[in-house]
Structures are given as C-alpha cells and as structure tokens.
Amino acid sequence: MYEFNLTLAMPYGKAFEKVRDALLAEHLGIVSDVDVQAIFKNKMGKEIPAYHILGACNPKLADRVIDAEPNAGTLLPCNVILREDGAGNTVVSFMDPVTVLGLCASDEPKMVAAEAKAMLERVAEKLGG
C-alpha cells in the first residue's frame, strides 16, 4: 500500500497544529505546504473541505538518498495529507516511504525509507493512531 492513515476526532485547525508539532518532534521539518482547498477555489471556483499536502523532510535522510541516487529526489519529500472528513474529524494520511523509495535501484534509499517510515509511524502513534 502507498499510505497509512488515521482519523483524529478534532477540528481541522487543532489537528493541523498537532500534526505539525508531532512531525517536528521526530525531526521532520515541513518543507512545503500545499493548500489544495485554496488552490481549487482560486483556480477552478471549486469548494472542497480543508485539505493540505505537507512535505515532511529530514535533511540528513534526504541527503543519503540523493547521494546514492541523485534523481531519486523526485521521490522526496514524504507527503502527509490532512483533510476534513465532513463529520468534524480530520484524516491524516502518511505516504509510505518504503513503497515509494522501493522504486530505487540501489539499497541506500531503501534503508533510508525504512528509517523514515519508522519516524512517520512514531508520529502516527503520538497522534493516537
């Protein structure tokens, strides 16, 4: 499977802060934040519930991947999505780096993927998943 997820029984804004803090506690910085809801509204006039794609990255892990396979940067960072589910909950979905970096030819990115997945799993545990 390409992702694993959990549902937080809390409003989106509170969940967003909690997820951000949990990522930072695992030394995963947020290097990108795509507000899909705003983009859809501005570009298409389409209203959707809150939806963000966060790019989470540990620079030391990313460096190991890029050193081993420079073009593997196309598979970075680890994406985490947050979305409102319509019932007042927030779904948090984590990209599975083992699946994604499993596309690499060399072993180093695959080893990094296992480390990154463990970090993301700890984030999910801290969030209550």
Image (tube, grey):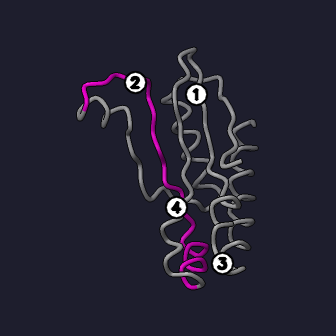
| Mark closer to the chain start, 1 or 3 | 1
Mark nearer the viewer, 1 or 2:
2
Bin the neighbour count of mark 4 within 10 Å (Cα to Cα): few under 14, some 14-19, many 20 and up: many
For marks 1 and 3, give the CA distance: 36 Å
- Looking at the image, is 102 positioned above or below residue 70? above
* Magenta run includes residue 61: yes
Q: What residue type is labelled 3?
A: Ala
Q: Find the magenta span and give its range.
A: 44-67
Q: What residue type is labelled 4?
A: Pro
Q: Which residue of the protein is positioned furthest toward the top in this rendering?
A: 87
Q: Does 109 sit left or right of 59 as displayed?
A: right
Tell me the tag on residue 48.
Answer: 2
Q: Mark 4 points at which residue?
A: 77
Give the camera-side residue of 118 and 66.
66
Give the camera-side residue of 47 and 121.
47
Give the camera-side residue of 5 and 126.
5
- Confirm or deny contact between disc 4 and disc 3 (CB under 8 A): no
Bin the neighbour count of mark 1 within 10 Å (Cα to Cα): few under 14, some 14-19, many 20 and up: many
Mark nearer the viewer, 4 or 3:
3
Q: In which quarter of the image is residue 24?
A: bottom right
- Looking at the image, is 48 positioned above or below residue 16? above
Q: Mark 3 points at which residue?
A: 105
| Mark closer to the chain start, 2 or 4 | 2
Give the structural element (helix, strand or loop) at label 4: loop
Q: Name the residue under label 1.
A: 90
Give the camera-side residue of 54 and 100.
100
- Looking at the image, is 74 positioned above or below residue 120? below
Q: What residue type is labelled 1?
A: Thr
